[in-house]
Amino acid sequence: GESVGLHLPTLSVQEGDNSIINCAYSNSASDYFIWYKQESGKGPQFIIDIRSNMDKRQGQRVTVLLNKTVKHLSLQIAATQPGDSAVYFCAEILLSGGYNKLIFGAGTRLAVHP
Amino acid sequence: DTAVSQTPKYLVTQMGNDKSIKCEQNLGHDTMYWYKQDSKKFLKIMFSYNNKELIINETVPNRFSPKSPDKAHLNLHINSLELGDSAVYFCASSQDLRTDNEQFFGPGTRLTVL
């Protein structure tokens, strides 16, 4: 079926530590994945994306890893800061009825402690 | 210079009422979307429109009727509101239907049905 899920609903880290948020997806035909950040009271905001022909992509302080063999995505945040506190969603693009739609996972709340 | 805006931000109403949520984007995008986020933060697509034409309708009850008067606007009208309609509704837009086009989300409208 259509589902993208997360292993950990809440992740607490110390400021300055690295954070790793994991996600499992179910549709092996998906070829495009995105991580979104949602701060309290705001809409989701694009962080980083990755295509299925890649296994790693780096941005500023963030890295996304894709393991197609086990259908697993992860988001790594280096030197986590208080401003990183938010809910993080992985999402996959699913082709449905001839059109692409974004399927979100359940979300992981990241809490950064000073 | 807000990219995707929604009104109202909060909406509290009684069961059985009819209400509308408005969305506007000033990005010049062709494609607009409505998503529903429930109390567990799960985000699910409801509709997408491309150039004012309905593309995706995710088996949403027909009490929900989106209307796109022009490419920059996608409004959501809800008839006979039910308790289960309480959620945060997000509007989003993207350049077009291409897979890798980033979706930009609005700030959300929190609907509470009493």
Image: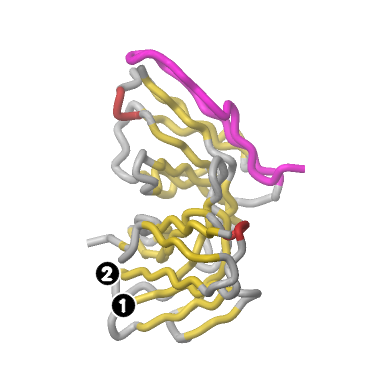
Which of these two is toward me, B57 or B114? B114
Q: Is residue B41 visible?
A: yes
Residue B8 in the magenta stretch? The answer is yes
Above or below B104: residue B9? above
Q: Position of residue B75 (x, y in %)?
A: 53, 32
Give the farthest residue toward the front: A114
Q: Is residue B41 magenta?
A: no
* Identity, as a three-letter code, of the amino acid under mark 1: Lys
Upstream in the sequence, badge 2 or badge 1?
Answer: 2
Q: Nearer the viewer, residue B99 or A52?
A: A52
From the viewer's side, name the closer residue of B98 and A51. Answer: A51
Horizontally, residue A69 falls left or right of residue A17, namely left
In the rendered structure, the residue with mark 1 lies on which chain?
A
Are discs 2 and 1 located on one and the same chain?
yes
Q: Position of residue A74 (x, y in %)?
A: 42, 74
Q: Position of residue B25 (x, y in %)?
A: 65, 43
A25 or A84: nearer the eye?
A: A84
Q: Which mark is residue B32?
A: none
Image x and y of residue A32, in percent: 45, 72
Please identify the quarter of the rendering in which residue B57 is found. top left
Give the residue pinned by disc 1.
A71
Q: Secondary structure at mark 2?
A: loop
| Residue A40, quarter of the rendered image | top right
Which residue was labeled with disc 2?
Answer: A26
Mark 2–mark 1 Cα distance, whole angstroms, equals 7 Å
The quadrant the N terminus of chain A occupies is bottom left
- For image coordinates 37% across by 64% down, the residue present is A94
Q: Secondary structure at mark 1?
A: loop
